[in-house]
Image (cartoon, rainbow, N blue to C red):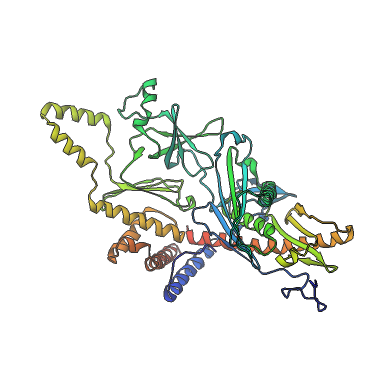
Amino acid sequence: MEYVSPEGLRLDGRRPMEMRQIRAEIGAVAKADGSAVFEMGNTKVIAAVYGPREVQNRSQQLSDQALVRCEYSMANFSTGDRMRRPKGDRRSTEISLVIRQTMEACILTHLMPRSQIDIFLQVLQADGGTRSACINAATLALADAGIPMRDLVTSCSAGYLNSTPLLDLNYVEDSAGGPDVTVGILPKLDKVTLLQMDAKLPMDIFENVMQLAMEGCKAVANYIREVLLENTKTLEYRRGV
Amino acid sequence: MRGIQLSLNQTQKLRLQRALEQLESLSSKANSNASVTIADTIPVNYEDGVLKGHGTSELDGEVVATMCGVVERVNKLVYVRALRARYKPEIGDIIVGRVIEVAPKRWRLEINFSQDAVLMLSSMNLPDGIQRRRTAVDELNMRSIFEENDVICAEVRGFQHDGSLHLQARSQKYGKLERGQLLTVPPYLVKRRKQHFHNLEQYGIDLILGCNGFIWVGEHIEAKDPMVEDQVNKSEQQNTKSSKNFTRLEEQEQTYTPPETRQNICRTANAVRVLSTLGFNITVEVITETVELSSSLNLDIHEMLGSEFCVLVAEREAERRRLLTKKKG
């Protein structure tokens, strides 16, 4: 199948190096300490953060740092065909673990000993790149909850189809079976905290694809920063002196 | 932007927008661009020396924010004041909390902090007011003082060496709160002040603005000194031959809240709710003003949570702050 037309356009009309439209909104869940909705094109994810709060299971309590937990789930209505999703299937457990590790790397857990931070992620619409969208939503929600972090984590995916590196794959491109590289970076520190690919790629091409994904992450980071600054300013001026 | 979830019609939307814009223009004059987000570099003057406070860290010789908030500078100290974070206790803070567990010699309280707070049996006055060592009998009778799910007002005593937060309630003004409503607002909206207990006499209610963002609105209760009361009771007992019926009636009277007071409690609670959804600073003055506004408009209590009143409060607040800055300037 042709994923990039001879004119250099993808199936949804984007250029190979073009991202989908992103949109973020802070404060979607009233009762949570921090929450956010993040959209990348048709992919839509809602994140809620609770904590730092008392550890629910005393045996898991860590005396020198906070416990970070993450739960990823997909809504029944999120995909094209509606289906019941059992909680804790292999795919969602794996993604939960990946996101937990990524977020734990950037949270300053040693500042909140003997407490626990819960991150709940729910995919409302799945159109490829849910992993990336979840990480971006989780970053926003953690920042909203006022949890100290080393840096914002942002994530974006890239692929390689029809001998062209493509940024931010959607569902159709994702299911083409080509390589899908998900990258998570700390933009300020310029470090990679997440790198996933379940296919083979020659070294030189891989470098190109990863570079592209990192550019995408930086674009997301700029947007997220704007949203957070806007939110902080709003809260501050509303509060007044 | 944190959206206000209300169904506004077109005019209300415009009015709210205008009021909020006015608020923005007022505050931007006061402090310009002090807001930072995570991983923003905070400009500092290195020649004077810098002390890095909360919400900051060092990266390649630069001071970098680790939270979203507002940069504050006190002499050499640079720190970030977080807005929507959980409560951070300071010694002497007056807080309102809910008992979640009765443990040996202590109660555990939920106070919106990263851990549960501990109120030791030994750090509170006994109900009979006698100063003495707590015995095993006192420990067994702990549920007669506070039970699970009771709402309590106490003071932050400090952090113990094992990192747990301890509270104390060594005065008549602290203790169990009854006959009222508990409201939770983000803690950054409550400012630390000299006075956190307020008695709104005109409504016959007590208002406790806990530093942890828990606000208590309840019927006014006279703080009584038990020693004095005991003496009075004794003399009364000597004077009057009180029958059993009489005492029962008295008891009933003590636990009964008149409907007007109940309405006032609800009205005040709704005022706090409106202010917190708008994200305005919560003080007694603003609360009473909001309550007065609602009663002067003859609004029903449930109408206070509607969009019209919300817009009115926003406009009123904008006007109030404009006058304040005018006075200063």
| Residue A236 screen position, x and y as percent | 52, 59
| Residue A21 screen position, x and y as percent | 67, 69
| B81 lies above or below A206 | above
| Residue B51 screen position, x and y as percent | 64, 45
Identify the residue at the far bottom of this view: A7
Residue at 13% x, 26% y is: B238
From the image, which quarter does the N terminus of chain B lie in?
bottom right
Residue at 35% x, 62% y is: B304
Q: Determine which quarter of the picture holds residue B228.
A: top left
| B118 lies above or below A3 | above
| Residue B41 screen position, x and y as percent | 68, 55
Q: Is residue A7 left or right of residue A132?
A: right
The residue nearer to you, when weighing A48 against A186, is A48
| B2 lies above or below B83 | below
Q: Is residue A230 left or right of residue B272?
A: right
Query: Can residue B68 be seen at all in this image of the molecule?
Result: no
Circle count? 0
Query: Can residue B112 be seen at all in this image of the molecule?
Result: yes
